[in-house]
Structures are given as structure tokens and as C-alpha cells.
Amino acid sequence: METKETIFKEIESLPKPLIPEVLNFVRFLKSKTIKEQLSTPILSETSLKKDWLRPEEDEAWQNL
């Protein structure tokens, strides 16, 4: 059985008052994933900034 199917079966067996908590948890996981995907470019910005802010870079891109 696939993991999704197992999750669906588990959710179906939950008492109705717990369903909103499951939904909140799923939304939390999605949000966490998005934040993690965004953190890599933000963390690399500091090290890349050294190269981006050089006069040579400005000169190379000025005609575009």
C-alpha cells in the first residue's frame, strides 16, 4: 500500500474533532518546506555579494 493511501486511511479513522489538527499539521509541513527552499538562496547571498558588488561585475552587465 502506498504511503498516501495509508495516510488517507488513518485520517478516515480519526475522530472528526481531530481532522482540523491534521489539516493544520499538513499546512505547517508545506510552509516549512517552502521556507527551507527559500533559505538556501538567502544564506548564499552573503558569500555571493562579494562577487556581485565588484566594479568589474557592474561593467560586464551595463550593456544588457
Image (cartoon, grey):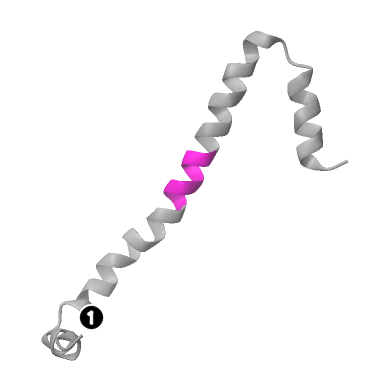
Q: Is mark 1 on a helix, strand or loop?
A: helix
Q: Give the range drawn in magenta.
A: 30-36
* Position of residue 51 measured from the top left corner of the image (x, y, whole percent): 23, 80
* Position of residue 43 measured from the top left corner of the image (x, y, whole percent): 33, 61
* Position of residue 30 measured from the top left corner of the image (x, y, whole percent): 52, 40
Q: State the quadrant of the C terminus.
A: bottom left
Residue farthest along the right direction in this orientation: 1
Question: For the point 19% across and 90% down, which residue is it?
Answer: 60
Look at the picture and state if 36 lies above or below 2. Answer: below
Q: Which amino acid does label 1 sit on?
A: Asp
Residue farthest along the left direction in this orientation: 55
Question: For the point 81% across and 33% down, which residue is it?
Answer: 6
Residue farthest along the front direction in this orientation: 64
Instruction: Report the side of 58 relative to 3 (left or right).
Output: left
Look at the picture and state if 4 lies above or below 51. Answer: above
* Mark 1 Cα shell of 10 Å, populated few (<14), some (14-19), many (≥20): few
Magenta span: predominant SS is helix
In terms of image quadrants, where is residue 10? top right
In terms of image quadrants, where is residue 26? top right
* Position of residue 55 measured from the top left corner of the image (x, y, whole percent): 11, 86
Look at the picture and state if 39 lies above or below 5. Answer: below
- State the residue in front, 20 or 43: 20
Residue on which the image places disc 1 = 51
